[in-house]
Amino acid sequence: MEQLSRRERKKLETRQRLMETALRLFSERGYEATTVKDIATAADVAKGTFFNYFETKEAVLPAIAARRVEQLEEALRPDLGAPDSPVARIKLALHLIAESRLCQKQLAERLFAAMMRRQEIDVGHALRDLLAGQVRQAQAAGEIRSDLEATYLAGLIHALFFQRLVMWHRGDRPVPFRESLETSVDLLMDGAAGPNWPRAW
């Protein structure tokens, strides 16, 4: 793997600092109330520096989401402490997404709108690809039926997660979101169970 130069590392660090600062301010102050100047000041860079990395404030959200998918890939590595069971890793992935500030109602709506307007679908595809990889590993381990198309099942899991999130934000809250998500995923996974399903838990 080619090593980054000092200049490239500095640029990457600045970009990541801007993203993390923006996410924190959006969460604390609200998206509308946070300006580009606020983000730049809190990140200790000039306002013009922000525009070296992002065209608009809106462009930050898809970039943050893409970064979160990259971090999720790391979090699902068994050699770094993730569960050995691929099905358990799928559930872990969904829990980690649910805990993200990007799933707060206002930010989730803003992110979706930004992706639609900018036609940035790579983030959604990246997440489905990540889930599909875990499904394939679960099929190899006998935790999920091998006759199911991994990409299709990953799409169902992806859609189920966001359906439950939307319902939660709309006030359908008979139980905590994580519990509601867990129950829904368990029902889906039960229908996809492979021969080694009992040993997955």
Image (cartoon, helix red, strand yellow):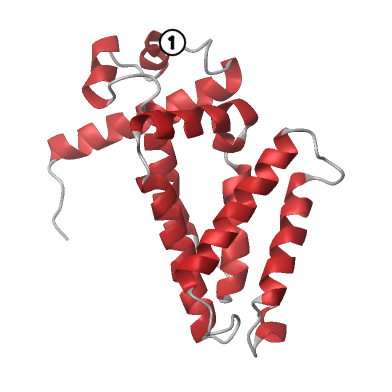
Seen from the viewer's position, the closer of residues 9 and 153 is: 153
Kind of residue at badge 1: Thr
Q: Residue at point 53% right, 84% down? A: 147
**Res. 50 image quadrant:** top left
Counting from the top left corner in percent of width and height, residue 58 is at 40, 23
Quadrant including the C terminus = bottom right
Horizontally, residue 32 falls left or right of residue 38, namely right
Residue sticking out furthest to the bottom: 195
* Residue 120 drawn at (x, y percent): 35, 39
Residue positioned most to the right: 174
- State the image coordinates of residue 2 (x, y, percent, origin top left): 13, 56
At a point 80% along the width and 45% down the height, the residue shown is 176
The image quadrant that residue 62 belongs to is top left
Q: Residue at the spot x=41%, y=61% of the render?
A: 129
- Determine crowd level at label 1: few under 14, some 14-19, many 20+ residues with C-alpha closer than 10 A: some
Could you tell me which secondary element the residue under label 1 belongs to?
loop
Which residue is denoted by mark 1 in the rendering? 35
**Quadrant in the picture for the N terminus:** bottom left
Query: Between residues 37 and 193, which one lies in front from this camera angle?
Result: 193
> Is residue 93 at all visible to an observer of this figure?
no
At a point 36% along the width and 15% down the height, the residue shown is: 40
Regarding residue 71, the answer to whether it shows in the image is yes
Along the horizontal axis of the image, is 75 left or right of 191?
left
Image position of 37 with respect to 71: above or below: above
